Image: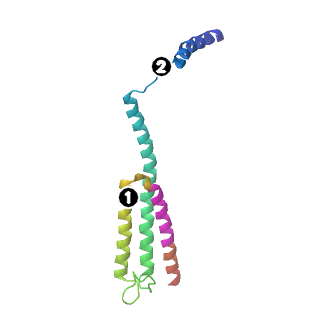
Amino acid sequence: MKNKFLALNLLLASAVIPQAFAADTVVVPAPENFVVQAKQSVAAERFVYQKSYRAWQLSLIGVAGSQAMDMYSSYGLRELNPALAGSNQKFGNQSALIKLGVAGAMVGAEYLIVRKHPGATKLLWKLNLASAAITGATAAHNFSVR
């Protein structure tokens, strides 16, 4: 049995080895192979982008939630940010609309960036989580001051 496998391997090697070392034999992939390879790499790349895209989408929930909690915790208190402070130096309806507008503009700009450069989602979801953590800490501080 071993002799049959050895003979088969030798026969196969004697047929393949001369072709591998032949000078005039050049293996050129057919054009359809390039298409298949490109589709596979795009599909693999898309899978990575889909994971980071999903993480970016979920990070937007954190941003929206932390902004809402910060608005709720700040409402009626003295506002230290002069851009948000109303005429009586307190956080009110006008301040909440400004805060919502800025957050909405940020999310809209991120959406446009992600549409143009899908690879940016990896960075953006991390920045969103950091922003949500800082805003959430601010809301926690506001609740402790009440």
Q: Is 70 above or below relative to 119?
A: below
Helix, strand or loop at mark 2? loop
Residue beneath the point at 44% across and 40% down: 41
Examine the residues drawn in magenta and state their main secondary structure: helix
- Is residue 44 rendered magenta in the image? no
Give, as a three-letter code, the residue at label 2: Thr
Q: Nearer the viewer, residue 72 or 21?
A: 21
Give the magenta-colored segment's residue range. 121-135
Q: Is 41 above or below relative to 84?
A: above
Q: Is 132 above or below relative to 73?
A: above
- Is residue 133 rendered magenta in the image? yes
At which x and y percent is residue 128? 46, 64
Q: Is 8 above or below relative to 137?
A: above
Q: Nearer the viewer, residue 70 or 111?
A: 111
Q: Pointer 1: what residue?
A: 113
Q: Pointer 2: what residue?
A: 25
Residue beneath the point at 41% across and 86% down: 90
For label 1, the crowd category at 10 Å Cα-Cα, with few meaning under 14, some 14 to 19 and many 20 or more, is some
Residue farthest to the front, as pictured? 23
> Which marked residue is nearer to the observer: mark 1 or mark 2?
2
